[in-house]
Amino acid sequence: MTTITISEEIAQKIPAVTLVSIESTVVIEDKNDELWGLIDKKVNDISASLKVEAFGKMDAVAASRRGYKACGKDPARYRLSAEALLRRIVKQKDIFQINNVVDLLNFVSISTGYSIGGYDADKISGDIRFSIGRGDEEYQAIGRGELNIESLPVFRDSLGAFGSPTSDSVRTAVTNETKRFLMVIVDFGYREGLNDAVKTAVGLLLEYAGACNIRIKKIVYDKADK
């Protein structure tokens, strides 16, 4: 299983961080109609009940915003992926349909408020550290092009930064050729919804991605325990 650690520079800035990695072998489909029906219903429910002003009251989103501010990044300018998805829904914009694995990840994200990374595990080189981006690092974000990751929480392997709670990179993107999928749920201090998020993610992977060899690991840093 891929090894993930939380760097000292993250620990110095954010009092509590929990990462949950879910690694599995999956079967990629361009689209799963049953899954998309589930997503469509969730989107309609959110659109009918949620307002933009309410995002700050969602515990997972609020904790993530605080984490970004602690690292020196403006969460209003560099939106966390969960909040960006929710904003699209509330503004009556479609969320993008990618493939069954990315789609189910997005379902978990909009259902829980957690920003979640999704990666082709075979494209990751060596161990992973959850760290902070530097100004001299190049980063090609999926659907965004060049992204300034200075002061942004990032996942980094031996080749450099490849993921963040704002946008994952092209380098480790999930494609139709992906066999081993790594999902990482990022919790910046709100833990009450984490177990439910993991349970939902695993259930969807089993149901809609033919997942097997599922391995789950929780990585925790809490300054209060030190």
Image (cartoon, helix red, strand yellow):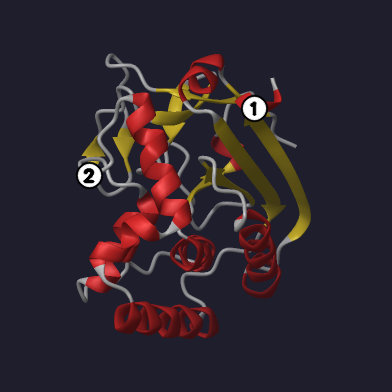
Question: Which element type, helix, strand or loop, lies under badge 2?
Answer: loop
Q: Mark 2 points at which residue?
A: 76
Q: Which of 143 and 65 is in front in this view?
A: 65
Q: Nearer the viewer, mark 2 or mark 1?
A: 1
Q: Nearer the viewer, residue 172 or 203?
A: 203
Q: For this view, does 100 lie left or right of residue 93?
A: right
Instruction: Point out the image quarter for the C terminus.
Output: top right
Label 2 or label 1, whichever comes before in sequence order: 2
Q: Using the image, determine if residue 73 lies above or below residue 186.
A: above
Q: Which amino acid does label 1 sit on?
A: Ala
Q: How crowded is mark 2: few (under 14 residues within 10 Å), some or many (20 or more)?
A: few
Q: Position of residue 40 (x, y in %)?
A: 40, 82
Q: Residues within 10 Å of mark 1 (few under 14, many from 20)?
A: few
Q: Name the residue under label 1.
A: 224
Q: Position of residue 73 (x, y in %)?
A: 29, 30
Instruction: Point out the image quarter for the N terminus.
Output: top right
- Residue at position x 56%, y 15% in the image: 8
> Which quadrant would residue 125 be assigned to in this image?
top right
Q: Position of residue 16 (x, y in %)?
A: 57, 33
Q: Using the image, determine if residue 46 lies above or below residue 19.
A: below
Separation of residues labelled 2 and 1 (CA atoms): 28 Å
- Residue at position x 56%, y 19% in the image: 7
- Residue at position x 54%, y 41% in the image: 189
